[in-house]
């Protein structure tokens, strides 16, 4: 039989392209294929698995029943004893194997705890030490201020005393110059006196020891020079003599001395040296009389009525000073001594 070419049904089927045919297959209601792991699970395999489970369950029941009804010397009891012995040995071996690890971990934990405790205690010790140092510093500062207050109370009516802190020193000549935290706003003027407490260094009722003078004043700070500066020139005498010892000066090393002292002058070691308070006809001395400076530490050089050279050690070492008292001229006499009137 020959197919009629004009038959529309035949024409439609022949004219369909491969793409259109695959599209028709996708639209058809075809169940998706099973995942690979389910493709080989057949009813026979399921039946075998169930049989194995039921067989194991039956064996467990029969074994338990036989174990209960068996005497203590039976096969099952003997097997249990053997398994228990083997398991005990395995357990002992496992415990012995794990013990070093457990001990090591315990040691590490204790070491870490001890280290933390040590750090905590060290912090407490550092804090207590800092508190103790702070209290000691505060106590020293309080004592220094109390001594300065005593000096202020004993200061001549010609001066007004204020406390000042040394805030800086030069890189060189640290024992000759310094800067304080008081200035013109506090009333400080040039040639104001710099003093410190006696602290019992010399048995006298004079509480203040002369250590220097103010040389330059800013608004809130001032520069001071100590007696160890080479610019020092002070008329001095010993405390127990009314005769002028001579002119006190400082050499390049900061040592105080008085040259040209008459050989007839009575001198003794440890004699206190004080200011004379005299100047020249044209210029008054900025230092009032009877201010403590230092003591005679050595003298010599007099031969056949010649002159002495007297070495004087200051009562106050400038290197150790942190706080000082500034005596500011108040009266007309003190201001004339300072050269400000």
Image (cartoon, rainbow, N blue to C red):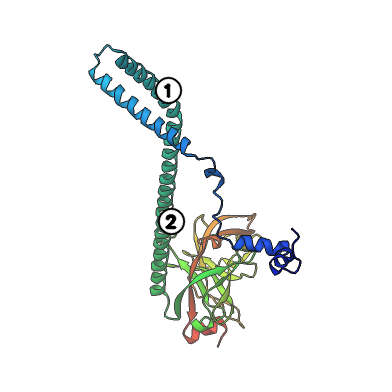
In this picture, residue 132 sits left or right of residue 64: right
Crowd band around label 1 with a 10 angstrom C-alpha radius: few (<14), some (14–19), many (20+): few
Residue 247 in the image: x percent, y percent? 60, 68
Q: Nearer the viewer, residue 165 or 15?
A: 15
In the rendered view, would you say 18 is above or below 215? above
In the rendered view, would you say 310 is above or below 106? below
> Going 41% across and 38% down the picture, which residue do you hit?
110
Q: Quadrant of residue 197?
A: bottom left
The quarter in which the C terminus is drawn is bottom right
> Of the numbered discs in the image, which one, if any, rests on residue 130?
2
> Going 61% across and 61% down the picture, which residue do you hit?
26
In this picture, residue 137 sits left or right of residue 19: left
Residue that carries the numbered disc 1 in the rendered image: 93
Callout 1: SS:
helix
The number of callouts visible is: 2
Residue 235 in the image: x percent, y percent? 57, 71
Q: Nearer the viewer, residue 275 or 321?
A: 321
Q: Nearer the viewer, residue 43 or 210?
A: 43
Residue 249 in the image: x percent, y percent? 62, 66
> Going 39% across and 23% down the picture, which residue do you hit?
92
Toward the front, the furthest residue is: 1
Residue 73 can be seen, yes or no: yes
Residue 248 can be seen, yes or no: no
Residue at mark 1 to residue at mark 2: CA–CA distance: 56 Å
């Amino acid at each position: 039989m020959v197919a009629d070419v004009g038959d529309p049904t035949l024409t439609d089927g022949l004219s369909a392209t491969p793409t259109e045919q695959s599209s028709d297959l996708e639209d058809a209601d075809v169940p998706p294929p099973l995942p690979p792991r389910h493709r080989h699970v057949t009813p026979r395999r399921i039946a075998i698995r169930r049989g194995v489970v039921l067989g194991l369950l039956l064996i467990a029941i029969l074994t338990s029943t036989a174990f209960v009804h068996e005497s203590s010397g039976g096969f099952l009891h003997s097997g249990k004893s053997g398994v228990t012995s083997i398991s005990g040995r395995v357990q002992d071996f496992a415990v012995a194997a794990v013990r070093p690890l457990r001990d090591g971990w315990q040691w590490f934990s204790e070491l870490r705890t001890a280290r933390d405790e040590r750090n905590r205690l060290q912090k407490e010790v550092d804090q207590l030490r800092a508190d103790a140092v702070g209290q000691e510093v505060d106590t020293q500062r309080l004592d220094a201020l109390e001594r300065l207050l005593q000096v202020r109370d004993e200061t001549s009516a010609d001066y007004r005393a204020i406390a000042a802190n040394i805030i800086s020193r030069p890189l060189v000549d640290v024992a000759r110059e310094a800067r304080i935290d008081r200035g013109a706003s506090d009333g400080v003027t040039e040639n104001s006196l710099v003093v410190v407490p006696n602290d019992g260094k010399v048995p006298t009722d004079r509480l203040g020891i002369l250590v220097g003078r103010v040389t330059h004043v800013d608004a809130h700070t001032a520069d001071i020079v100590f007696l160890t500066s080479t610019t020092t020139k002070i008329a001095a005498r010993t405390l127990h003599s009314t005769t002028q010892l001579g002119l006190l000066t400082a050499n390049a090393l900061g040592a105080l001395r008085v040259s040209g002292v008459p050989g007839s002058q009575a001198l003794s070691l440890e004699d206190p040296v004080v200011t004379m308070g005299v100047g020249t006809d044209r210029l008054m001395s900025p230092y009032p009389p009877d201010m403590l400076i230092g003591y005679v530490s050595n003298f010599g050089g007099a031969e056949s009525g010649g002159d002495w050279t007297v070495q004087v050690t200051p009562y106050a070492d400038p290197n150790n000073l942190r706080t000082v008292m500034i005596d500011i001229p108040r009266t007309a006499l003190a201001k004339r001594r300072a050269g400000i009137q």
